[in-house]
Image (spheres, grey):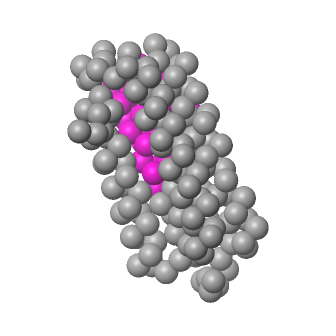
């Protein structure tokens, strides 16, 4: 697959793709065990009822989708585009956790992994892999990443219910 000049190597790209599912597990663990746990937190903060089981199923689905996305990106030769999408997803999620914590001046489950893992990972990825795709594809990837966060936010506010 042709890439832009000075684009990261295939080995670097593949390595960074697999960082996302691993860091997702870290984030899920903190949301589950951090503070009161995400389901109790979202109930207290927003009045959203989400059982622990529904939370774990939703996070499991998210983890599987990210992993399948990585596999498909490698298989169908769009790894840099996937990195832009994933970088945007984790950066926006991290910003959301941080802004919420600042607005209530309190810890929320997932905050530390957002600040120390996902926001730096998102920024690094968006800067490092910027040269791996065209300008148009870069901004489409960013838009997709933001769109994923909007959909996840809507589903979260519905208590994880799709219907």
Q: Is residue 64 magenta?
A: no
Instruction: Give the vertical position of 145 relative to 100 (above or below).
Output: below
Locate the N terminus and report the quarter of the image it occupies: bottom right
**Relative horizontal placement of residue 21, taking residue 160 as reference (left or right):** right
Q: At 30% across and 15% down in the image, what residue appears?
A: 44
Residue 115: image quadrant is top right
Residue 67 percent across, percent down from the top left: 58, 51
Instruction: Give the vertical position of 3 relative to 151 (above or below).
Output: below
Q: Is residue 111 magenta?
A: yes
Residue sticking out furthest to the right: 11
Residue 80 percent across, percent down from the top left: 58, 69
Q: Which residues are magenta?
A: 88-113
> Who is closer to the viewer here, 110 or 73?
73
Instruction: State whether residue 149 appears in this view.
Output: yes
Q: At 50% across and 50% down in the image, what residue appears?
A: 65
Q: At 51% across and 37% down in the image, what residue appears?
A: 60
Locate the C terminus and report the quarter of the image it occupies: top left
Residue 69 percent across, percent down from the top left: 54, 58
> Who is closer to the viewer here, 150 or 98?
150
Instruction: State whether residue 121 appears in this view.
Output: no
């Amino acid at each position: 697959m042709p890439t832009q000049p000075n684009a990261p190597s295939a080995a670097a790209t593949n390595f960074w793709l697999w960082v996302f599912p691993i860091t997702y597990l870290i984030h899920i663990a903190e949301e589950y065990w951090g503070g009161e746990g995400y389901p109790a937190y979202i109930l207290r903060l927003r009045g959203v009822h989400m059982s622990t089981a529904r939370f774990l199923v939703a996070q499991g689905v998210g983890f599987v989708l990210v992993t399948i996305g990585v596999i498909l990106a490698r298989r169908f030769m769009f790894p840099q585009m996937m990195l832009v999408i994933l970088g945007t997803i984790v950066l926006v999620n991290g910003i959301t956790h941080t802004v919420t914590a600042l607005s209530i001046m309190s810890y929320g489950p997932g905050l530390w992994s957002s600040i120390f893992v996902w926001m730096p990972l998102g920024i690094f990825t968006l800067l490092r892999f910027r040269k791996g795709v065209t300008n148009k594809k870069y901004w489409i990837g960013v838009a997709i990443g933001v769109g994923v966060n909007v959909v996840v936010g809507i589903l979260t506010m519905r208590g994880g219910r799709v219907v």
